[in-house]
Image (tube, rainbow, N blue to C red):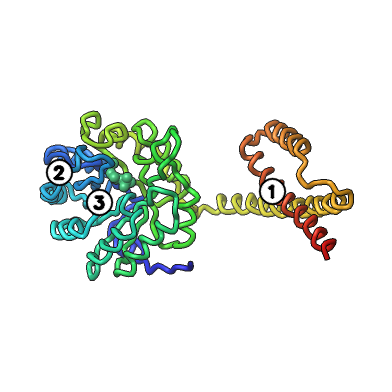
Amino acid sequence: MRTALNILPISEWFTGLKAPLLIAGPCSAESEEQVIETAHGIAKIGKVQILRVGIWKPRSRPGTFEGAGDEALQWLKRVKTETGLLTTVEVATPMHVEKAIAAGVDILWLGARTTSNPFSVEQIAQALKGIDIPVMVKNPVNPDLELWIGTLERLNRAGIIKLVAVHRGFYPYEKTRLRNIPKWELAIDLKSKFPNLPILCDPSHIAGQASLVAEIAQKALNLSLDGLMIEVHRNPSQALSDAKQQLTPLQLDLMLKELVFRSPSSQNSEFVDKLEQLRNKIDSIDQQMIDLLAQRMRIVEEIGEYKKKNNVSVFQLRRWENILKSRVEYGIRLDLDEEYIKNLLQLVHKESIRKQADILNRKDKLSAE
Ligand code: PEP
Ligand code: MN
């Protein structure tokens, strides 16, 4: 389905925006002191523009800490006046929307569980009708781009044009090093569909542990995502939710000093010339690769005809095993990644099989006539 979102570029609504946009704060609001102390620690760094905090927490199991609730909205007012940071909270019901707006929260965000549920999204969108506030939309729990886009659309139809997407990774069904699996290609797909839509990364929920946050944040910056949302707590080991993945304000400061912030392009003419030359080389190699693939396919077709004539089946296991082994070994000798070569060959082989099966089927049809 084709979609056009009416998105106001962030530079037009975020006066004083520093790119990349940095958002940090506790997973949950636990107490006034915890929120205020963490906010001051973050503000002191001088790079973060928005304080995030969950005050109504969607927890997987009942009986776990569900955030401080309404009371925490007053603490956010203190954050704004004392630190100058803007504030953002997660909203999951129309009541949250109403309360957050009444308390002067600057930006709202929809969490991964909410984005996964079109009924909740629709209710929130209705509650936002006629209200001018930026809304950030985390990706749904499962890697379903349509659901992510659908949420943006529902909000957009309700009149929200200050939209931001947040890539926080996807639920892994198997045990992995990371808590949620990043699917950068999905974020890039979203960016190419909606070039005006800023996309942030939440490296904390992808990493699941503090020691991996910087690695994920750097990946996001390398891919030119528009900013980061990072979980920061004055004392992570005592946090009532997501204790393992939160950084201290000091750790955040160190990480921001070490991250390499790359610009998506450069005005330097030497750089532009060199890049142009290298891109020309890539263009030429790609063309040769496609020529070779076409040549290969002509031979595959010839083999198909030959197999047909001799009544031999398309798939020859031994031959395929040999191809895979010898090509992978050769690729490794040239410093190419094993998985990369395997995936590439599998793709080429799948298409060859399809082509030869077509040739054999054509013959079957003809002989049936
Ligand atoms: C959060 O940001 O604390 C949170 C609950 O995140 P998510 O919706 O990405 O799980
Ligand atoms: Mn969290």
Inspect this view and state whether residue 291 appears. no
Q: Earlier in the sequence, mark 3 or mark 1?
A: 3
Q: Position of residue 26 (x, y in %)?
A: 23, 41
User: Mark 3 CB in 8 Å range of ligand 1?
Assistant: yes
Name the foreground residue: 278 vs 116. 116
Q: Residues within 10 Å of mark 2 (few under 14, many from 20)?
A: some
Query: In the rendering, at what x and y percent does residue 105 appear?
Result: 19, 55
Q: Which mark is residue 90?
A: 3
The residue depicted at 55 percent of the width and 54 percent of the height is: 269
- Residue placed at 69% from the left, 48% from the top? 350
Sequence-wise, the earlier of marks 2 and 3 is 2
Tell me which residue sits at (45%, 55%) in the image.
Answer: 145
Crowding near the residue tagged with mark 1, few <14, some 14–19, many ≥20 C-alpha atoms within 10 Å: few
Q: Is residue 329 visible?
A: yes
Select label 2 or label 1 by which is in front: 1
Q: Which residue is mark 2?
A: 68
Tell me the distance, in whole angstroms, between the alpha carbons under discs 3 and 1: 45 Å
Residue type pointed to by label 2: Ala
Q: Quadrant of ligand 2?
A: top left
Label placed on residue 350: 1
Q: Secondary structure at mark 1?
A: helix
In the picture provided, is 24 more to the left or to the right than 340?
left
Q: Residue 355 sits in which quadrant?
A: bottom right
